[in-house]
Amino acid sequence: MIPIPHVSVLQGPIMDFFQTLKIFTFVDGTLGAGGHSAAILEAHPEIRTFIGIDQDPQALKISGERLVKWKDKAHLMAGNFSEIDSYLDSLNIKGIDAMLLDLGVSSMQLDQPEKGFSFSRQGPLDMRMNPSEELTASEIVNTWSEQKLGRIFRDYGEEKRWRAASQAIVQARAIKSIDTTLDLVKVLEPVLYRGKKGINPLTLIFQALRICVNDELQKIEAVIPKILRRLNQGGRLAVISFHSLEDRIVKNAFRYAASDKEETSGIGGVFISKNPQVKLITKKPVVADETEVLKNPRSRSAKLRVIEKL
């Protein structure tokens, strides 16, 4: 039995940003344990259709139990938020009034050793958020070239010693396959520099593998334009990110959607006008206050951005 995690990250600010809306159709693209959604459904009894999406079957089971009070209006979908159009089309829904994305891996998943997300717990090198997908971290670690490994550690983990990490993996797997999280830790700890301050560099390597396994950044980039097309006028999209790569994608997509100019770099400073699709509700990301960070250390890295459809 997986316990329901603590209060969802940045729940207070999210409730505030949705407070003034009349929400008839709400989508939670990263349902998890259903904490955010339960609070929104409670605060907005006018909701007629709720759609919750998650690629983790255990999360859907837990959230289904948590949201049973609203079962007559709730539709829980197994899959990734990037397929938002398919889910809405299946319910014959044209537009939505609000949507939430809480990106990255959840505390619930980190606490399951069998998922292989944590370098501090023994588990298989899996890292699939959706267990029906084929690609695993084990396949990447044990079969991908040194060059490809280095690229994902550099680009998705922003790890400075990406060359040393990829080289150590290739040398180690030539002797014995790297099958578990702690096998990988044993290979990498001697070659990753760990100063007195800052996060454990293993965090960055595991992050890079997880992002690659689940194709996370490409899915975030692809889904935002889809959501904007589906948002009704006055509808809002809220996105919580947990590391700079996610936040950069969200920030740039939101700024472009809010701009009245096309990107014109490289064509001699000519400005091409366009109609802005949204207005920025948050000019800067909202972060957790000290009280929330003390209660939930994971919230320390959370950044919330919100836009409203024009």
Image: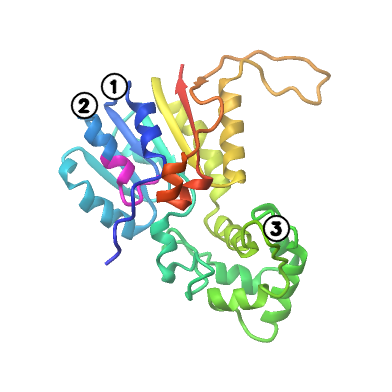
Q: Position of residue 31 (x, y in %)?
A: 35, 47
Do we see residue 97 in this rendering?
A: no
Q: Position of residue 119 (x, y in %)?
A: 54, 69
Question: Disc 2 or 1, which lies upstream in sequence?
Answer: 1
Residue occupied by mark 3: 159
From the viewer's side, name the closer residue of 144 and 14.
14
From the viewer's side, name the closer residue of 214 and 67.
67
Q: Position of residue 106 (x, y in %)?
A: 43, 54
In the image, the segment drawn in magenta is 30-38
Residue in the image at 30% along x and 47% along y: 34
Q: How many marks?
A: 3
Position of 92 relative to 192 (above/below) = above
Mark 2 vs 1: CB contact within 8 A: yes
Q: Amino acid at mark 1?
A: Lys
| 297 is within the stretch colored magenta | no
Mark 2 vs 3: CB contact within 8 A: no
Residue in the image at 80% along x and 17% along y: 269
- SS class of the residue under badge 2? loop
Give the Cα distance between marks 3 and 1.
44 Å
Give the Cα distance between marks 2 and 3.
47 Å
User: Of the numbered discs in the image, which one, if any, rests on residue 40?
Assistant: none
User: Of the numbered discs in the image, which one, if any, rests on residue 46?
Assistant: 2
Compared across the picture, whether 92 is left or right of 298 comes to left
| 34 is within the stretch colored magenta | yes
Display colour scheme: rainbow
Residue occupied by mark 1: 22
Position of 122 relative to 303 (above/below) = below
Compared across the picture, whether 11 is left or right of 39 comes to right
Give the Cα distance between marks 2 and 1.
7 Å
